[in-house]
Image: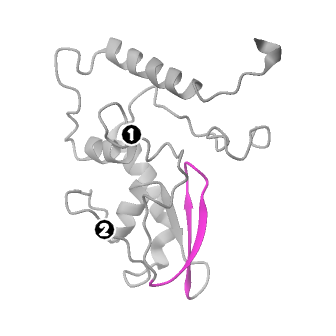
Amino acid sequence: MVTAHRTTCKLRTGAPPFRLTEPTSKEIMEAIQGRLSDAKLVNDDDLRADIPSNINLPKVEGHSEQLVYLSALGWNVSKPKRGSLQLGCEFCARALHIRCGNKFDPIHEHERWCPQIDCDDHGEPVWQQDINIVLNTKNRVSGRYAGSQIYKEVYAHTRRIIDSQSAIITPNYV
């Protein structure tokens, strides 16, 4: 499946480009803690990532806010050998090696098509939606259709249409 896609195809990693259902708070926290499991050897001095001041993050015992922020953005962080860090995105399959102490921008280092940094119709990125679900502050759709099944279905179909517009149609299928 992976080799059948072009290297620039956003479906190559297997991550869906849209959500059919909203994840629960428990599912999101399990994913974040799973990404943090390899980061036990990473110290606060090893990684420098700027966290925006308007971001509230869930507290994960034994891990710094920087690591929680990175894992909420989909990054796995590990320290394979002394002096370097290995980072990999679970969604766009971006892999990086950086020296300990270097600054890392967890948003801009994703592939441009990564579904974790993709924004919805309200301009809110997926990773921010996940944090809002965990912190129980999710209130992004106002009006009488908020949370209705019809709204979710229309939104899912809209995302499919937007994503299918980038598909290449060969002359054989026209």
- Secondary structure under badge 1? loop
Left of 30 or right of it: where is 111?
Answer: right
Residue 156 numbered mark, or none: none
- Secondary structure under badge 2? helix
| Above or below: residue 119 compared with residue 92 | above
| Above or below: residue 123 compared with residue 111 | above
Three-letter residue code for mark 2? Glu
Image quadrant in which you'd find residue 70: bottom left
Left of 29 or right of it: where is 83?
Answer: right
Per the rendered image, the range of residues in magenta is 83-101
Left of 57 or right of it: where is 174?
Answer: right
Dot 1: within a 10 Å radius of its alpha carbon, few (fewer than 14), some, or many (20 or more) residues? some
Residue 119 numbered mark, or none: 1
Q: Which residue is drawn at 61% across and 63% down?
A: 95
| Above or below: residue 174 compared with residue 91 | above
Q: Which residue is drawn at 31% across and 38% down?
A: 123
Dot 2: within a 10 Å radius of its alpha carbon, few (fewer than 14), some, or many (20 or more) residues? some
The residue nearer to you, when weighing 42 against 164, is 164
The residue nearer to you, when weighing 83 against 12, is 12
Please identify the residue farthest to the right as the structure is shown. Answer: 172
Image quarter (top left, top right, bottom left or bottom right) of the C terminus: top right
Q: Which residue is drawn at 59% across and 68% down?
A: 96
* Colour logic: one colour
Q: Earlier in the sequence, mark 2 or mark 1?
A: 2
| Marks 2 and 1, how far apart at CA | 23 Å
Q: Mark 2 points at which residue?
A: 65
Three-letter residue code for mark 1? Cys
- Give how far across and how far down residue 127 sits, in percent: 38, 47
- Give how far across and how far down residue 53 sits, in percent: 20, 63
- Give how far across and how far down residue 94 sits, in percent: 60, 58
- Give how far across and how far down residue 126 sits, in percent: 39, 42
